[in-house]
Amino acid sequence: MNLLPTEEQQQIIDTAKHFLDSEFPVSDALALEPGASRVQRPHLEQIAQLGWFGIGLDDACGGVGYGASEETLLYMELGHSLMPPSLLGASLGARIAAAAGHDAQCSAILAGSARVALGVARNTAVPVIGERVSGEFIGFEGQDSDYLLLAGADSAALVDTQALSEIGATECIDPTLTSTVYSADGVGASAWQASEQEDIFHRGALLSAAMQAGIAQATLERSVDYAQEREQYGKPIGSFQAIKHYCADMAIRCESVRAMLYYASVTLQNRDDSALLDVQTAKTLADDAAVRNANCAVQVHGGMGFTQEMDIHLFVKRAQVLSTLFGGRRHHLRALLSQARPA
Amino acid sequence: MNLDFTEQQLDFRGEVRQWLHDNIPAGQRPEDGAEGREFDLAWQRTLYAGGWAGINWPLEYGGRGLDTFQQLIFLMEYSRSGAPGDHYRFNGLNLAGPTIIACGDEQQKKTYLPPILKGEVIWCQGFSEPSAGSDLAALKTRAVIEGDELVVNGSKIWTSWARFADWQQLLVRTDPDAPKHKGISWVINRMDAPGMDIRPIRDMAGGSDLHEVFYDNVRIPLKNVVGGLNNGWRVSMAQLSFERGTAFMPSQIETQNTIEDLIELAKTRKLEDGRKAIEDDHIAYELAQLRAETRALLAMTLLGISRNERAGMPGPEGSMLKLFQSELYKRINALALEIVGPDRTVLSQLAGRWPRAFLGSFANTLGGGTSEVMRNIIGERCLGLPK
């Protein structure tokens, strides 16, 4: 028993950090025109070469053959660097294609030549997601993508974006993404899986929770740095308990979410009895930690936190986007309360 | 990252489970202090006789000399088995004992460690003073060297179990001219020494386990100084890291049992409109949130133990665990009153254990460092923010 990353797992973290810091610094995101993608098609192929989209996929399916833990560690770093949700679309999309036996589709996604946007159902109607797809959906980065990935608790589907009716593309709350609203009325899925075969919904919940943990951590780090530099009343503001205690609470949220993600990634990989409870718990707490830490970071940064000169607002906005994916807090709170008493 | 135990560890777990099953005392621990003391000591003697005392203490002082994970397995099994809590044994087993192991000399280890494991003595703590609470290093209780003795004058407060204890780990000021952190010594004091006056304090939950302790020319042999004269601050910091770093498994399991019991209660208890409490959205979401945080507490506890094992000692993250657990436990008990409804006002079986547990839970965010002190420690030691 040891919940810490092994040396090999630590290498995955370090490699990811190094690559992201040099190739995709968050400062680049600040300089983007609204709606412009930070990860263009050539970038997607560059990232694909690292094997990241298949890190948790069996090598028989063209993946790297690691498990949910390694994938979780990678996605924590991707969240920390504010990388777009379409990377998660690739990891999950490849998984659906592989399970459906669509080898060419799977290879194209793993290679970054086919792009998968993540979609979420609007509250206008109860969506149908399966062999046929109906409903209204918001796709993040849908415009430049080949597929839209939709996941409900019971099943998940990859839909060709060309087959969907586009109601309109609009500015996304997160300026590094776009929101496209689609409608579908019985559109045939390009590939789909029921959760009994391949539980995309809960894997997506785990990995989007990992991205949220990265946001919680990044906004903690920025707040601590700022609290050490910024002086008022002749002292760094971090010496005042009002600020110090905000930071302490942010740190606890990071620590509790990190521990829960490590734990849930292991129980999900092992298919333990508690796996769903653990993933639902991780998503619930990670959404909360990302939203609260990012919001708190604005307050710690004072007036500067409210400007677009600093990158804090990007994390505030991304946390809101990720909170809508793979079940929000209300869904997961309900679900985890109905789980059996853990052993 | 793994949660698997080895074959050997699984065998060990089976052994612990079986022994506990066969040896847990029947019946409740007595409420009365003197009877409680006898109950606790008798149970410790049973543990010692069975070979289950001091799992990770060195063999030469009566322990088992086993590793962190065997300690973890033992604590998990122990806490789940419904075996008696530490109660009066807490201080000796978790604070005084480990401190003497870490900082004591050979003679002190031989003299003081075995009686703790053999169930012969109860220990208590003399740290806080009326004017030195969160600012512990401001303590004033004075100890003057006379020959080979210290002569102690002053007073301590919040000493748990003082009137039922045999020995006390006591912080005294041995050098009033040194900076406040550098003039303190950690000494072992006999609770029946002449010049001691012990007065119980009634707490808001109706208990009287806390005390004020007064010292009027109390004599303590110099050889009872642990870790060197004027080095007591460093010794007590080592100790607070035990308090915050290890021994979390029982409180984690207690928290888990409490939230799970509360969820069960909400499935049967009715609200004023006749619905079951759990059918109310507000109550359901609160219960779910607390259940989630309790699950995270388990993961944090295991992560902390994993770090201890890698680094060889508890890190400052233990402060996070302490803060997280105590605040969580208080919120669970507060929600319980909402579920119990108007019956919360009745201190009888109508409302079960919840009203008293609610009142008692306030101690959790005060004792062993207030939540505010914990946040300062996290800010300064974990995050590097300025004082």
Image (cartoon, rainbow, N blue to C red):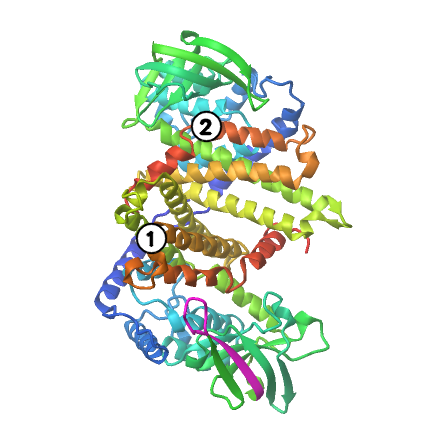
> Picture quarter containing residue A171?
top right
Magenta region includes residue B204: yes
Magenta stretch, residue numbers: B202-217
For label 1, the residue is: B340
Q: Which residue is at the far right?
A: A234
For disc 2, the neighbor class at 10 Å (few under 14, some 14 to 19, many from 20) is: some
Provide residue B216's location: percent of width, then percent of height: 58, 88
Magenta region includes residue B223: no
For label 2, the residue is: A324
Please tell me whether residue B374 is drawn above or below residue A311 in the rendered image: below
Q: Which chain carries label 2?
A: A
Element class at badge 1: helix
Residue A97, numbered circle:
none
Q: Which chain carries label 1?
A: B
Please tell me whether residue A257 is drawn above or below residue B384 in the rendered image: above
> Picture quarter containing residue A327?
top left
The residue sitting at 42% across, 39% down in the picture is A282
Seen from the viewer's position, the closer of residues A140 and B51 is A140
Label total for image: 2
